[in-house]
Amino acid sequence: MDAPSDPALRLVHLEDNPVDHGLVVRALRRAELEAEVQLVDTLEGFREALTGPARVDAVLADYHLAGFSGLEAWTWMRAQGLDLPFILVSGAIGEATVADAMVRGVSDYVDKQHLGRLPHVLQRALELHATRRREAEAARALAQSRQSLLELTEHLQTSIDRERADIAREIHDDIGGALAAVKLDLAWLQRRLADAEALAHVASALTMTEQALGASQRIMRNLRPAVLDQGLMAALQWLTRTFAERTGLEVTLHGALRTATALPARVEMAAYRTVQEALTNVLKHAQARRVRVEVSDLEDHLTIEVADDGRGAAPEELRKERSFGLLGLRERAQSVGGWLDVVTAPGQGMTLILSIPLSEAARQQTAVEED
């Protein structure tokens, strides 16, 4: 013998008049809606029906009930986190009451004198609920995907910074040490040779060795700025000064860090790299003459602004020529719990604003160290 098929719909009908319940069931059957309709007439029975093991697809509820109202049942349902279509099926209750119920989130209202509308209203409420549920699930999936991407970006950035530090250390210990030894040997030869042609070759070799040492030191600073060991402000002072000397642009640094405790290492690196990339973008794109860097840590937020007086950019330009650079800066800011804002317009320069909540950054730093 076949098991009874599961009904297409399971409805809970909160109604204290059995005759009205019968009329509701008849209206659904006339529309050929296959549904199992459970009648409950108390608030306690309503709660049991919705928290029991049986699936519930929607709720139909009278407004006026013995000792309570349908809206009280709705309020309890929402407080429990139960998200179901909820349709008031009642006698005339007035437009103001209906409007209040709809504002609270009730799905719809059907007058008992017009039960022929009920099947259509119910189907519409079920479809809308299904659509909202799919949208919510998609939003949750998107949020999870973004969180996973952020965690991956953070992991990759941490790995990159560690790898850079290792490479910088190897350059210092191996290449830098070897070049320094070569320089000493060449200087020894220079003091002992008398042949002019040999001395010229030694002098040329010394010059190239000096250049190689300078290049290795520059590469080490780019990979892992040792100046960060002296603190963020000292590193930014060195960065803005050397950038101005190299490019001829007027670069000024303003502000100060008032906190007595050292910033998390990941925050200092994110801030330093942001200013470094912003200055590089100014040189590449802005056609600017002056750049102002402002630093503060008021109200538990590290804020860094890099403003230039260049040509600025329209939104479509940002999406094209600078999009990947800005995307990288935004991801770096997010990796330490911060964010990046861009303020610009054609002919009005550009300002990049990095904001990092220091308490959140400290929490993330602790989590990374524990891992």
Image (cartoon, rainbow, N blue to C red):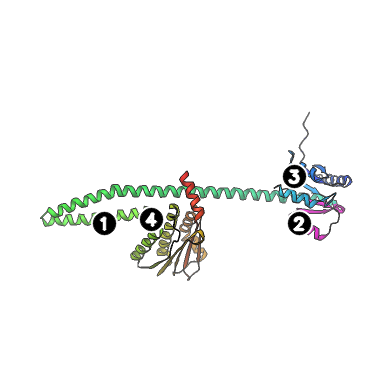
Q: Does residue 277 appear in this view? A: yes
Name of the residue lying farthest toward the bottom: 347
Q: Name the image quarter holding residue 103.
A: bottom right
Q: CA distance from mark 3 to mark 4?
A: 60 Å
Query: How far apart are the alpha carbons under marks 3 and 2?
Result: 19 Å
Answer above or below: position of 267 versus 33. below
Q: Is residue 338 left or right of residue 189?
A: right
Checking the image for residue 102, the label placed there is 2
Most distant residue in the top direction: 1
Q: x, y percentage for residue 258? A: 45, 61
Q: What's the CA distance linking mark 3 and mark 1?
A: 77 Å
In the rendered view, tell whether residue 177 sits above or below residue 256.
above
CA–CA distance in space, label 4 to label 1: 24 Å
Q: Which residues are magenta?
A: 87-114
Which of the two discs, 3 and 1, labels the residue nearer the N terminus? 3
Q: Nearer the viewer, mark 2 or mark 4?
A: 4
- Which element carries disc 4, helix, strand or loop? helix
What residue is at 22 percent from the left and 49 percent from the top?
Answer: 181
Nearer the observer: mark 3 or 2; the answer is 2
> Residues at badges 3 and 4 in contact (C-beta under 8 Å)?
no
Tell me which numbered mark, 3 or 4, is placed earlier along the sequence: 3
Which of pointers 4 and 1 lies earlier in the amino acid sequence?
A: 1
Disc 1 or 2, which lies upstream in sequence?
2
- The x, y position of residue 321, in whole percent, is 46, 61
Residue 57 is labelled as 3
Give the x, y percent position of residue 242.
34, 62
Label 2: how many Cα within 10 Å (few below 14, some 14–19, many 20+): some
